[in-house]
Image (cartoon, rainbow, N blue to C red):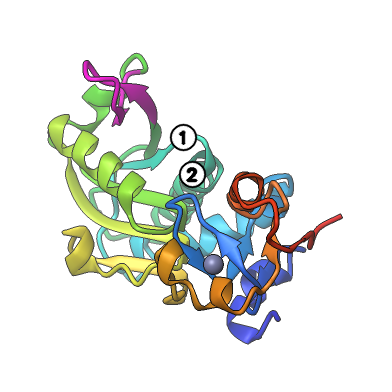
């Protein structure tokens, strides 16, 4: 439970489970789960995490570090708070840099923040689209940083990257709070990937799950995956609740 690598989320009251039995959104099973919901209702936590996510993409003091994006983009709903705070943090650094420096460096006047939303396509398949007024045109010909909360298989991140590219934007990197599926810059097809917590959580196909074989109780809290629905289909299997 909550070893040091998870401090950045456990400090804000988030729970990390490493030795239980869960069903993930992907329907895979596994022993570990990180719930970052408590961060979403704490503005200071979001602010501090935004500053950390912004780190590689903002000027520091008089030194220019990394590439400063023109736009930060994220997937609704979970990514919005993190992306917004990251954009704000980069803007703060740009202001501080401009005020302290005699060197003329060309930065965007304001780093913008947009989000992509899940919509149904013509074949009723869920896809990400950038559809709000003015959002897509902000990306055209611009450098875009994609921000995520928890990156699992990378499907929503890939969706946002695709939207940004369709809108003519250049994705300069992906930053996220938690990467738990072993994603890399290469697997995401971007120049750099900056997760604050990077863990490769083991996952099993349901019919190959060793925890099912040992009848380890299934966690059925609503906030911790899809165990509840699974348990309804397996009424004789033992269950447990971890959150109150
Ligand atoms: Zn299982």
Vertical order, 18 against 80 (above or below): below
Residue 92 is left or right of residue 153, and the answer is right
- Looking at the image, which residue is at 62% across and 69% down? 21
Label annotation for residue 67:
none
Q: Which residues are magenta?
A: 117-131
**Where residue 132 sits: x, y (%)?**
37, 17
Disc 2 secondary structure class: helix
Residue at far front of view:
236
**Where residue 234 sits: x, y (%)?**
62, 52
Q: CA distance from mark 1 to mark 2?
A: 6 Å
Whether residue 16 appears in magenta in the rendering, the answer is no
Whether residue 125 appears in magenta in the rendering, the answer is yes
Vertical order, 70 against 24 (above or below): above
Give yes or no for contact between labels 1 and 2 (Cβ–Cβ under 8 Å). yes
- For ligand 1, which image quadrant applies? bottom right
According to the image, label 2 marks what residue? 79
Disc 1 secondary structure class: loop
Q: Nearer the viewer, residue 24 or 103?
A: 24
Q: Nearer the viewer, residue 200 or 211?
A: 211
According to the image, label 1 marks what residue? 76
Q: Is residue 64 visible?
A: no
- Looking at the image, which residue is at 58% across and 82% down? 5
Residue at far bottom of view:
4
Q: Is residue 148 visible?
A: yes
Vertical order, 27 against 1 (above or below): above
- Looking at the image, which residue is at 41% across and 39% down? 75
**Where residue 143 sits: x, y (%)?**
21, 45
- Looking at the image, which residue is at 68% across and 49% down? 223
Residue 19 is left or right of residue 208, and the answer is right
Q: Nearer the viewer, residue 43 or 108?
A: 43
């Amino acid at each position: 439970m909550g070893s040091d690598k998870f401090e950045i989320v456990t400090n804000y009251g988030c729970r990390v489970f490493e030795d239980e039995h869960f069903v993930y959104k992907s329907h895979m099973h596994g022993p570990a789960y990180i719930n970052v919901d408590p961060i979403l209702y704490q503005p200071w936590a979001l602010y501090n995490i935004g500053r950390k996510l912004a780190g590689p993409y903002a000027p520091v003091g008089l030194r220019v570090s990394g590439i400063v994006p023109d736009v930060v983009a994220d997937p609704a709903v979970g990514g919005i708070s993190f992306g917004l705070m990251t954009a704000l943090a980069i803007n703060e650094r740009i202001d501080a840099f401009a005020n302290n420096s005699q060197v003329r460096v060309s930065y965007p006047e304001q780093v913008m923040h947009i989000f992509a939303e899940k919509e149904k396509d013509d074949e009723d398949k869920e896809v990400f689209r950038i559809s709000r007024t003015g959002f897509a045109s902000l990306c055209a010909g611009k450098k875009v940083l994609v921000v995520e909360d928890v990156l699992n298989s990378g499907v929503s991140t890939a969706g946002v990257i695709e939207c940004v590219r369709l809108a003519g934007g250049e994705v300069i990197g992906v930053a996220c709070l938690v990467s738990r599926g072993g994603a890399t810059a290469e697997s995401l097809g971007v120049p750099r990937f900056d997760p604050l917590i990077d863990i490769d959580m083991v996952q099993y196909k349901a019919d190959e799950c060793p925890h099912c074989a040992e009848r380890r109780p299934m966690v059925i809290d609503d906030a911790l995956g899809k165990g509840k629905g699974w348990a309804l289909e397996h009424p004789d299997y033992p269950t447990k609740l971890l959150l109150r």
